[in-house]
Image (spheres, grey):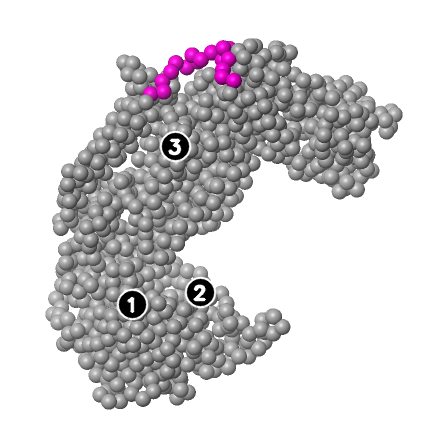
Amino acid sequence: MRTPLHKVLAVGFVAALVASGCGSERSESGSTAPEKGFAADALIGVALPSKTSENWVLAGDLFTDGLKEAGFQSDVQYAGASTTVADQQAQITAMITKGAKVIVIGATDAAQLSTQVSQAKQSGAVVVAYDRLITNTPDVDYYIAFDNFKVGQLQGQALLDGMKSRKATGPWTIELFSGSPDDNNSGVFFNGAMDVLKPLIERGEVVVGSGQTDVKQTATQGWKAENAQSRMDSLLNSTYAGDKTLDGVLSPNDTLARAIITSIKGAGKPIPIVTGQDSEVESVKSIMAGEQYSTINKDTRKLVAETVNMVKTLQAGNQPTVNDTKSYDNGVKVVPAYLLPPVIVTKTNAAEAYADDPKLSPLTR
Amino acid sequence: MGHALLEMRSITKEFPGVTALSDVSLVVRPGDIHAICGENGAGKSTLMKVLSGVHPYGSYQGTIFYQGVECRFADIRASEHAGIVIIHQELALVPGMSITENLFLGNEPRKWGRIDWRGANHRALELMRLVGLNEDPDTLARDIGVGKQQLVEIAKAFAKDVRLLILDEPTAALNETDSRHLLDLLRGFKQRGITSIMISHKLNEVEAIADAITILRDGRAIETITVADSGADEDRIVRGMVGRDLESRFPEHVPNIGEVFFEVRDWTVRHPVSAERLVCKNSSFTVRRGEIVGFAGLMGAGRTELAMSVFGRSYGVHLGGRIVKDGREIEIRSVADAIRNGLAYVSEDRKAIGLNLLDDVKTSVVAAKLSKITRRGVLDEAAQYHEAEHYRRTLRIKTPSVDEGVTRLSGGNQQKVVLAKWMFTDPDLLILDEPTRGIDVGAKYEIYGIIQRLADEGKGVIVISSELPELIGLCDRIYTVFEGTITGEIDRRDADPELLMKQMTSTKRMRSA
Amino acid sequence: MSRRRDLQKNLFGGTTSNARQFGMIFTLVAIIVFFQIMTDGLTLTSGNMIALTQQYAYISILSIGMLMVIVAGHIDLSVGSVAAFTGIVVAKAISEQGLPWPAGIALGLLVGALIGAWQGFWVAYIGVPAFIVTLAGMLLFRGGNQYIGNADTVPVPEGFRTIGAGYLPETGPDTGYNNLTLLLGLALCAAVVWREWHARRVRQRMEGAEPAPLWVSAVRLAVMVGVILFATFRFAGGRVGTSFPVSGIILAVLVIAYSFYTRNTAGGRHIYAVGGNARAAELSGVQLRRVNFLVMTNMGILAALAGMIFVARSAASGPQDGLNWELDAIAAVFIGGAAVSGGLGTVSGSIVGGLVMAVLNNGLQLIGTGADMVQIIKGLFLLGAVALDVYNKKQGRFSVIGSLMRPFRREPPRIPAPDTSTREAEFLPGR
């Protein structure tokens, strides 16, 4: 059995394997300067959070189409529903491996991506934080989003306007909700709203019924509807168990607004003024039906279109336009940002605001 | 031969690598009790599995005629439909269900789509009367003894309209009384025209009850003895089974007994759950070097409980008593202590608590004293192999290699592996609990030889057994146990079954020596 | 026996107990080859192999501990929560209390040991089933994570990140490769050669046991050395500044140490004994409670380590750390050949099982499969892998494709035994 054939085969196998392993991919890090542009059909990676809100699904579709139209190859990925952070880390790494030139990231946890972002940077990719700022890293190049502080201010103002329209003078009783604590934007929304509400609370014209005014007390873990609903349930059972009336609820987005309304309806109470954000279909219907009071139109189409424009600018080797170079400090550096203005939508201006939206405009008639 | 109820012709069944049955034929006449004898691994169970459809038609060669028609059973259901019911050695009752529920499991009488429990209970009582079982049908299966559980199994067969009853070692787990009752029952069935096939190791029972005896050896049918023609000759059966003469059931042995080296005094143990129940009451006994000491007693007399509580308090709650070894009182609080002090306990149930069935032969052999093959904290695989090889050769464990899984060994060889495992710990005292249960004549003989060799090496051996002839043939001295108390101590010369039985069933303490 | 079967037996070993594990090695090779083709060679690039190692090091560390827990007949559902809890405690201690990061690691291991001991106490000494204890632990420590962390994301300093995202330094002459990685690879080759030589020597010492022919050893060695060298060059040839990752080195050390412990020491064998038949083990002098306690405590320590490595890699501890990790670890162990009822399984098998899942995941991501489809495919794969094994076992036949990694096995191959009994033929399967 000890034919020399075995030895020949074995030696040949090893030689082949080792030889194929020898190819070195060594290159000096950061040697490829992104400013010089890249191929017009380069790969663009887009890493988005899990498919829990219609907006992200819409954004993904728009990115796929928009990048394709612009002549790029695209790789659009959503994180898995249960293992979000680890999934997104792996997806970004895969995009780097595939040689993406620009990676657009809608972060699941804004602070846990710095290793991947720095890998991306070293491989020569430009990192664009989409909608959510990535923190704790010097390697984010741009931030593109709607002006979230402005969103908060608009929500706060809408809440006041709505309550005034029902009851001309205060004091008004309200409750506050904020978004997920691991999302950098949650605090920005909340602070924007408090920018408007705080003076009135201090003057006693607006009363927070439960006294919970801190961003941590009002947080909604994971932006999950069930968490907002159960918090509202307990508020109704404690603070509003008697005849105390609730005039308004500050809700950071539509999904939570609807959960809050469901809770209030379940308790058999009249629906107060509830704010929202994102212009989700169900909420637009709710506004037209007179339940939810307002939402914010942050047209995902516009945001995606601007992002694709930014990618095109980078491809040509030019500096993309930014309009804010001092507000967005991620803990390590101030990230240059391009901010789009949000629009507040109530029943009165819905038809006008959604006129261009094929899905929403029929609902407003 | 007239009209046979069952005729199996030239059955050959092969497993990958082994031929389990080779050209075996079997003819069973209606109304007979037909015994099948053979050593473990001779192919008895395989033959019955072929008959009952466990090995479906097509997986064996040969033909089966039942009531004159050729049968091709695809599964057990098909054979049960034809009235052939097999009762396995391992009972298949659900412990947490009542007798009635067990009787009709999978076969529940229905009325309007609901289970008709009233009708079921009624029918259960009928069936129980048939097998002589006198219990409340609502009693849970776990609350009745093994003997009665066996009766439930048989009643279950009647619930299925049995014509041919197959019993695989029906009395293996039963005490003498229950065994006798079961044999009477079989005779009763015979009068009702029910045919039985019985696989058994107990030749005295076979002799007492069988109308015909078929002997299998190495997957071949050696002969079929018709008792009415030639009588049942135990020697002839044994010769057929092992292929040689056994001059004696026990090897010749001249005991060489030394000093008392192990002594238990006033040992008292209570039941692990119920605080009032004492399972050992002030038991005292001694063992000499080179001596084989027997413990006789009925099931539940407390023999196993005594042995296990001495072996590192592995049963019950210790209330009092001392152990003296080599003139020095020793403290044994755990199994590890017991092993360190040179004690070994070979349990009665080797599959449930004697072996790790996932292990192979070599890992089983060294399992109770890994320190012996550990060199600087690392297990020495070569040493393990050598040790296992050594016992494989000296105990004649039949296995292609020590790398074989223990489940692939026959009962007798598994028992040898357990013995090897405890001999490996270099014990001074071995406690063997039912060392020959469920193993065949040839292997028993070998195990007796091993026990005698151990005694000759100057070790003390305690043998616990329900078979009185075994104790009388093997032991130098026998203690009798009844309800947790040692009721007698009998020297070999004075031992006879009647005397032992008397002391095993009474509290009066007698001393013959 | 035919020449072909003889050859197969010699090359792959005659025993069948680890069939699933070796089936998995070939599955792994098949999956790698498949994705290597599908991704135009991206799968085996330096960058991807390094990333893969970093991404799955922590899950593999968990699966080592989980293997021991499962072999002992238990399960641990709390590992993800324990990892997250330890992560936040360590991150807070370092960033807010100013603890130096090496002390932070020590603190983390201590916290893990304490949690493990807590769970071990209930399992071993009170007798609460591990399923319940760790289900409680899952809630307890997830809640603890949120309580301490306020659902915040807490960053950790650069030094700490080394254990999750760090590389070996570049030293020595410019060879075009990372020199330390090359050295590691060579050391591993030497170790493999020594191991094979040693195994042959042990077999020679067994009287009557004929060692496998020399060419068998040679072929096996050639394949292993080839694979190691290939991997070495790939890991060493990545971007400047990268090498075989530090987390990979931690994992490798643990795999070697725990394989050795489970296979070659009395303590390791006691775990198998307890899982195989607890009562029999007890009556053989194994201290059941101590084994159970140690297994659970060890799991706590490894979960803590995995949590810290993840935090280091993510540069921060976050509220979603550790979600569903227990499921990944358990899946790896079962794909790697462990039995649900305990008593069977190997460390190396679990690592291979985890690697199969990792490569599958990575490959699907590289070809741009969405996270939803990835989960569906992984789920089907897990079911298929275990079902195939169960089916094979039922049929009593094994697709024994073998053991190129013989030194990592629990037992040497079957040695043809000398005939001492004339009635060997009587031997039958089962009774």
Asked if residue C121 is positioned above or below residue A360 in the image, the reply reads: below
Secondary structure state at the residue bearing disc 2: loop
Q: Which residue is denoted by mark 3 in the rendering?
A: C36
Relative placement, left or right, of B222 versus C93 is left
Q: Residue at x 65, y 16 (%)?
A: A339
Residue B56 part of the magenta-drawn span: no
Residues at marks 1 and 3, CA–CA distance in whole angstroms: 48 Å
The answer to which of marks 2 and 1 sits earlier in the sequence is: 1
Q: Are marks 2 and 1 on the same chain?
A: yes
Asked if residue A201 is positioned above or below residue A54 in the image, the reply reads: above
Q: Is residue C109 among the parts visible in the rendering?
A: no
Mark 2 surroundings within 10 Å by alpha-carbon count, few (fewer than 14), some (14 through 19), many (20 or more) = few
Tell me, for residue B13, which label it has, or none.
1
Q: In which quarter of the image is residue A204?
A: top right
Q: Position of residue A316 (x, y in %)?
A: 54, 12
Secondary structure state at the residue bearing disc 1: strand
Tell me, for residue B276, which label it has, or none.
2
Q: Residue at x 25, y 33 (%)?
A: A13
Q: Magenta part of the protein: which range?
A: A24-40
Front-most of C290 and C239?
A: C239
Q: Main secondary structure of the magenta part?
A: loop
Quadrant containing the N terminus of chain B is bottom left
Q: Position of residue C21 (x, y in %)?
A: 34, 44
Kindly indicate whether the residue at mark 3 contacts the one at mark 2 (C-beta within 8 angstroms). Answer: no
Tell me, for residue C285, which label it has, or none.
none
